[in-house]
Amino acid sequence: MPRLWLIDDTPAMHRVADATVAMVDGWDFDGHLNGADAVAAFEHLGDGIPPAVILMDFYLGDDRGDHVTARLRQLETAHHRPVIIGYSSVRSGSAAILVAGGDLILPKHENSAGINPSLLAYLRDWPR
């Protein structure tokens, strides 16, 4: 079962991502409010389920998404390379995440139902 991580310091975005993931069968959600916790969790996955997809915000309190992306890329293995998505309301921030090793950009938004339709479409199209 693929797992999606959200690295974002805004709790409301965690609620949106969790609600969106819940609409797609077969996905699990895990959220991190800062880059340091996410990097530590990635380093210590052990037998845990690694993320298949990581949504990366740009502004993370005292850290930035492009720096966290670069650290995660250094830690990944040949057996596990998650898709890292620039997921920021700051366009230049999403572009910086791509430069640091991210794979694509998705808009960070929600509809009136409290879900992100762009993320929902991406997860539904995910290769199984």
Image (cartoon, grey):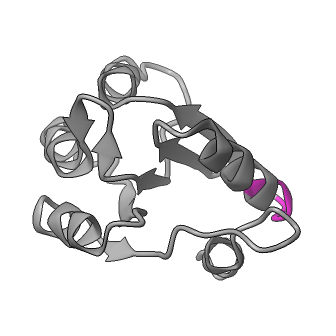
Residue in the image at 21% along x and 71% along y: 92
**Residue 89: where, in percent of width, then height?**
42, 66
**Residue 75: where, in percent of width, then height?**
19, 35
Marks counted in the figure total: 0
Left or right of 14 on screen, residue 34: left
Camera-side residue of 69 and 88: 88
Residue in the image at 50% along x and 21% along y: 47
Residue in the image at 59% along x and 76% along y: 127
Q: Quadrant of the C terminus?
A: bottom right
Q: Is residue 27 visible?
A: no
Is residue 22 found inside the magenta-colored segment of the image?
A: yes
Which stretch is magenta?
Answer: 21-25
Q: Is residue 39 above or below residue 30?
A: above
Left or right of 82 on screen, residue 124: right
Residue in the image at 77% along x and 65% along y: 115
Left or right of 113 on screen, residue 82: left
Q: Is residue 45 above or below residue 84?
A: above
**Residue 113: where, in percent of width, then height?**
88, 68
The chief SS type of the magenta part is: loop
Camera-side residue of 105 and 82: 105
Is residue 100 found inside the magenta-colored segment of the image?
A: no
Q: Is residue 86 visible?
A: yes
